[in-house]
Image (cartoon, grey):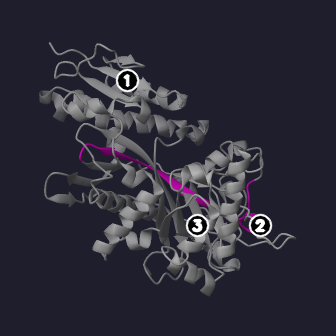
Amino acid sequence: MESQPIALVDWPSAPLTESLVRKSLNNALPLATLVAAIPETFAASRDNRMLQWATYDSMDHELTHFHADSVLSSSYTIRKALIRKHFLSRCIHSYTTKHSDSLLKNATPRTWDLEIAYADELDEMWSDELWDLGAELVEDPSKWWILKPGMADRGMGIRLFNSKETLQKIFEDFEETSDDGEDDQDQTAVITSQLRHFVIQEYISTPLLVDPYEINLNPDLPTKTPRTLQGYKFHMRAYFIASGALKLYMYPRVLALFSAVRYSPPTQDIASDGQPVNVDLAPHLTNTSLQTHKGEDGVRLLDELIGCHVLSGAQDDSHLGLILTAEDISNLQDQMATVLAETFKAALENPVHFQPVPNAFELFGVDFLVSHNPVNPTAPERLYQVQLLEINSEPAIELTGPRLTWILEELFLAIGEVCVSPFFAAERSRAATSLVHGDLLRKCLEVDVHGSGARMRPS
């Protein structure tokens, strides 16, 4: 008789994630023995199987590598091409160079990556890897750019700039933070000598704007009228699940995460000493981790935006007649599914930094911004164009808030049914594995990594 598997469940800094994993396993693998550490006596075999659904650092990746038939893990060991911004940038650049017709050309901001520890290193970069960026800064000072650390998250180190001098000042400020050891006034400050890798992206100056407070979650507050609405920037957080080598699924309940204050275009202020002042990031950053004081205020489901007035585009009252429709939302979801499928295809062409294996799966939180272009020369048929911002492993789902915890429960139950149950089911019963929540997942890519290549599957 086949023994029941053990399941390593260890999320020391993410109690909500741990509770969701345990609930999912109660449904998908009810007879498994849950442990917080791998028993010293454990020896993987066909009759002694294990699930590792834990943080990346808690797992034994050698078990994943050497025991493909008996150990299933909740993370691929090698996936830097996706989750590190500078690796992702290089991966996409390489892919679009080879595939000039790839949709990623219009679905990702133009990006430069750089390795820098000290501000004075910029002088040489302007004549080398940043030469074309420097030329654009001189030619068009009205255009803005965004600096992001390649490996930091939760808004750390993000800055806006529109000149060489401003970027120089940003890195000088980072150096001062490094010398001081801390910066109580700036929760987004970083230490460049520890991070080193950065990306610079073209700032998307035409974001889709809506007012989250048009969706009245508090019956005690008056409902806004069209003329009292204010445009807020938001990004979409979509959850994708990669399974094996390789299927890619999209969870259809997408979040819309809003900035803390109404949107206004970036402007550069100059201090009394003539030095540029850091741009106020509040209208531009939509990271929930920087807005914990707001609670759930800035978090909506994308579907909840159906019927909201579009507050970007036209600058007069004519735009008040434009609203987001169910068709618009469906189109955004289609774009996200297609863009991320193409991104995974790009990563697969970079096997040094992305190696999917049959006995692993992984949840990714993927961030997209929507550009609103009434006249879009690159895609005139699309009023709203999705732009891929970044891909996050072990996404911070704790920041979603209690109101929408139910979508996370549904997501994890679906992962258990689609990724976990089939691996541990007996061969004769795998085809009959019950899908209650798993049917919600939308398959957007299926690839035979060791075969002839990728084939898109209709949703």
Q: Taking the image as drawn, is residue 260 in sight?
A: no
Q: Which mark is residue 8?
A: 1
Query: Which one is in front, 242 or 236?
Result: 242
Q: Under tag 3, what secondary structure?
A: helix
Residue extent of the magenta highlight: 223-245
Residue drawn where x is 60% and y is 54% of the image? 192
Query: Which one is in front, 169 or 395?
Result: 169
- Label 1 vs 2, first from the N-terminus: 1
Residue 112 percent across, percent down from the top left: 49, 69
* Residue annotated with mark 2: 277
Query: Which one is in front, 247 or 153?
Result: 153
Q: Is residue 399 left or right of residue 165?
A: left
Q: Taking the image as drawn, is residue 164 in sight?
A: yes
Residue drawn where x is 72% and y is 62% of the image? 262
How much space separates mark 3 and mark 2, taking CA atoms?
21 Å
Q: In the image, is residue 352 above or below residue 434?
A: below
Residue drawn where x is 49% and y is 26% of the image? 19
* Residue annotated with mark 3: 121
- Label 3 vs 2, first from the N-terminus: 3
Query: Which one is in front, 361 or 446?
Result: 361
- Cβ–Cβ under 8 Å for marks 3 and 2: no
Packing grade of label 3 (10 A; few <14, some 14-19, many >=20) is few
Residue 426 percent across, percent down from the top left: 16, 26
